[in-house]
Image (tube, rainbow, N blue to C red):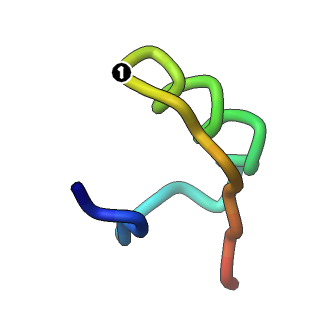
Amino acid sequence: MAKRLYVGNLSFQVTEADLSELFAQVGSVDSVKLIT
């Protein structure tokens, strides 16, 4: 299974916590890193 996932075209209001909460619904999230 993939260890990293790229998600593009996100709103500038999205936070790392938002993404972690969203993806935690389908599995374990070790870390989230937003690159701006």
Q: Position of residue 2 (x, y in %)?
A: 28, 63
Q: Which residue is mark 1?
A: 26
Mark 1 residue type: Val
Residue at point 64% right, 36% down?
20
Q: Residue at x 67, y 57 (%)?
A: 32
Position of 5 relative to 25 (above/below): below
Answer left or right for 16 relative to 20: right
The residue lying at 45 percent from left, 15 percent from top is 25
- Is 1 in front, or is 5? 1
Residue 10 place in picture, x, y as percent: 46, 59
**Residue at the outermost top position:** 25
Q: Quadrant of residue 21?
A: top right
**In this picture, residue 25 sits left or right of residue 28:** left
Q: Position of residue 29 (x, y in %)?
A: 59, 39
Q: Position of residue 9 (x, y in %)?
A: 36, 67
Q: Residues within 10 Å of mark 1 (few under 14, many from 20)?
A: few
Residue at image location 70% in from the left, 54% down from the top: 31
* Left or right, residue 28 beside residue 5: right
Using the image as rendered, state which of residue 4 and residue 8 is in the foreground.
4
Q: Residue furthest front?
A: 1
Residue 19 versus residue 3 in the image, above or below: above
Can you say which quadrant of the picture contains the N terminus? bottom left
* Image quadrant occupied by the C terminus: bottom right
